[in-house]
């Protein structure tokens, strides 16, 4: 039995459970002429030929895919219910997503979201009460339509989540039900044309008018126009707007006091969908992907909102303009504000993992069934049996497993953060390959790989440039390092080496020079090797920054070491991903 036949034998009885999407099933059925639908039978292939299977069954390892799925997915009943819901609404599953205009796709996504709500799912309730189920629902929706998953995320993680996490109980009572039922579609207006990743430098301003007890929200120039705002072009009736909070000088000075970026609820449209005075919104038009999302650009011209529209969990302003906050510094307030918005990043991770699982499954199934070439006078060989295909696809399968466990670890950390409010927790190309492996058939729109690649492309920069996010990871590691090994360079080096000798830091596992497969495949060895690499890179980066800092200054020293910074962050992420996965032996594979 070949590798392809073995893999197919394992997945065929469970293809529906592993990653069968309602979209794929509905599209396949609709592509068959009505007079042929009654004649369909399951065609035998080499992998299911009884004699071939019996003669080679003892040659290959076997495992129960049902046990594997049960181990991996303890909420699979929700996935089955969600996908069955869409099978019951075939009008929501177009044959080819790319054939829709942006207006048609937006309407389709809007209808799909309402179907989910009508079926009894309340994403905002799940986000507030059971985040695990909320993120799992997003992963399920990612393989129905990625635009639907993002639409739900904008409405509930971003718009709803910002109100819940940054506002007071009064804000929650006022907005929760209308947001939950999509009666009040909303936006998350943070990104500006001139500033994306550098949120602290946003220019939109909210100035308190003490005479009328109102905030005056204003876009001072074109660079401050809110840009790429989801839900803005058509649906959004309100937005959480991030703007610089400015109040009159309490000492009577002529200049306003700028307290930095805060969040405000700003109405955009009336109940009939008409723009309110001072609000200008333009449609961002067609995009490379995600055309089911109505992204827009928003400009405010002296828009007035009540003083109570400040989301005031971390800071408040009284009627006289006096500013107060339980957090002592502007930097801490800003960090706390952004820390409460990490749910959006967790949701994007869940959606990305769902897309990878779906794309890899499509590619592996195809490669296991598709036959091309072979020895003379012999049947053609499955594409998956070629080593070149295995080298391209099997690492992606392994990556899907690794990221699945890392996603689960991330969700658990998020849940712990929300439960404990622990400050430390608050701080903390695959699709193209799948398309190419499927050859010409992978280019067909009905197979969805092209749409998945286009729709998912923006996930790399949804939360800012990944280069910036990786720098944040390294900055967190350096902060912890400084706390553990403080002092002058020589003292810090002594502390580091002493900790290594005492076993607090991992030793270099490569000094044993053991090249036996048993050793190299040992999960404990691999874990130690990744830990050592991260610790060593962190130590050397700290030394380089200490060396260059006094001469160049902190900013230029960081920039000089930027490649080192990014390598450290990637090494740390790979270590976390690996350690998040359980030991394979615990699955009792035989």
Image (cartoon, helix red, strand yellow):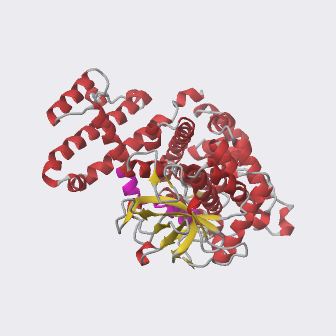
Furthest-front residue in this view: 252
For the C terminus, the quadrant is top right
Quadrant location of residue 130?
Answer: top right
Lateral position of residue 145 relative to residue 249, left or right: right
Which residue is found at the position 45% from the left and 54% from the top? 323
Quadrant location of residue 142?
Answer: bottom right
> Was residue 213 drawn as part of the magenta stretch in this picture?
no
| Coordinates of residue 442 in the picture (x, y in percent) | 58, 64
Which residue is found at the position 80% from the left and 57% from the top? 118
Which residue is found at the position 69% from the left and 66% from the top? 109
Lateral position of residue 177 relative to residue 260, left or right: right
Lateral position of residue 70 relative to residue 546, left or right: right
Can residue 568 be seen in this snapshot? yes
Viewer-proximal residue, 148 or 523? 148
Furthest-left residue in this view: 551
Viewer-proximal residue, 49 or 480? 480
Lateral position of residue 144 relative to residue 251, left or right: right
Instruction: Tell me: residue 275, above or below residue 163.
Output: below
* Dominant secondary structure of the residues highlighted in magenta in the image: helix
The residue segment tinted magenta is: 452-471
Viewer-proximal residue, 210 or 23? 210
| Coordinates of residue 223 in the picture (x, y in percent) | 41, 75
| Coordinates of residue 470 in the picture (x, y in percent) | 38, 51
Can residue 94 be seen in this snapshot? no
| Coordinates of residue 289 in the picture (x, y in percent) | 56, 69
Which residue is found at the position 78% from the left and 63% from the top? 29
> Was residue 462 drawn as part of the magenta stretch in this picture?
yes
């Amino acid at each position: 039995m070949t590798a392809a036949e073995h893999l197919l034998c394992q997945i065929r009885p469970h293809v529906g459970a592993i990653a069968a999407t309602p979209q794929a099933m509905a599209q396949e059925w609709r592509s068959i002429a009505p007079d042929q639908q009654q004649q369909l039978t399951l065609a035998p292939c080499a992998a299911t030929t009884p004699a071939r299977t019996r003669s080679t069954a003892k040659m290959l390892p076997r495992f129960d895919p049902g046990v594997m799925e049960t181990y991996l997915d303890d909420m699979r009943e929700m996935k089955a219910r969600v996908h069955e819901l869409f099978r019951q609404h075939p009008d929501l599953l177009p044959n080819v997503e790319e054939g829709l205009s942006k207006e048609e796709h937006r309407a389709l996504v809007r209808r799909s979201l309402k179907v989910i709500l009508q079926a009894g799912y309340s994403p905002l309730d799940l986000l507030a009460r059971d985040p695990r189920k909320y993120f799992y629902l997003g992963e399920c929706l990612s393989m129905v339509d990625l635009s639907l998953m993002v639409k739900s995320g904008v409405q509930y993680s971003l718009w709803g989540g910002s109100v819940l996490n940054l506002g007071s109980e009064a804000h929650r009572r006022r907005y929760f039900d209308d947001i939950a039922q999509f009666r009040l579609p909303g936006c998350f207006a943070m990104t500006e044309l001139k500033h994306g990743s550098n949120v602290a430098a946003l220019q939109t301003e909210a100035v308190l008018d003490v005479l009328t007890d109102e905030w005056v929200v204003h876009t001072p120039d074109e660079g401050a126009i809110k840009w790429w705002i989801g839900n803005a072009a058509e649906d959004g009736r309100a937005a959480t707007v991030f703007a610089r909070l400015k109040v009159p000088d309490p000492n009577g000075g002529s200049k306003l006091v700028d307290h930095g970026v805060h969040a405000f609820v700003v109405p955009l449209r009336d109940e009939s969908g008409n723009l309110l005075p001072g609000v200008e919104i333009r449609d961002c038009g067609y995009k490379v992907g995600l055309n089911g999302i109505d992204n827009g650009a928003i400009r405010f011209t002296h828009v007035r909102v009540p003083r109570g529209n400040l989301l005031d969990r971390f800071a408040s302003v009284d009627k006289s303009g006096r500013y107060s906050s339980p957090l002592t510094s502007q930097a801490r307030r800003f960090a706390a504000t952004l820390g409460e918005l990490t749910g959006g990043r967790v949701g994007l991770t869940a959606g990305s993992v769902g897309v990878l699982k779906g794309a890899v499954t499509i590619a592996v199934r195809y490669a296991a069934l598709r036959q091309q070439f072979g020895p003379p006078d012999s049947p053609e060989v499955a594409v998956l049996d070629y080593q070149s295909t295995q080298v391209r696809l099997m690492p992606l399968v392994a990556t899907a497993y690794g990221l699945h466990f890392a996603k689960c670890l991330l969700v658990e950390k998020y849940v712990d953060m929300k439960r404990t409010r622990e400050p430390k927790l608050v701080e903390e190309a695959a699709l193209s390959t799948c398309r190419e492996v499927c050859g010409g058939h992978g280019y067909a729109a009905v197979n969805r790989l092209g749409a998945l690649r286009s729709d998912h492309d923006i996930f790399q920069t949804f939360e800012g440039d990944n280069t910036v996010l990786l720098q944040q990871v390294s900055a967190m590691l350096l902060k912890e390092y400084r706390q553990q090994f403080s002092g002058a360079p020589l003292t810090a080096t002594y502390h580091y080496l002493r900790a290594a000798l005492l076993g607090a830091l991992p030793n270099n596992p490569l000094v044993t020079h053991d090249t036996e497969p048993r050793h190299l495949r040992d999960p404990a060895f691999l874990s130690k090797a990744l830990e050592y690499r991260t610790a060593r890179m962190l130590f050397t980066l700290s030394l380089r920054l200490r060396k260059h800092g006094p001469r160049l200054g902190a900013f230029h020293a960081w920039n000089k070491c930027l490649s080192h910074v990014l390598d450290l962050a990637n090494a740390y992420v790979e270590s976390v991903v690996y350690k998040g996965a359980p030991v394979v032996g615990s699955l009792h594979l035989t």
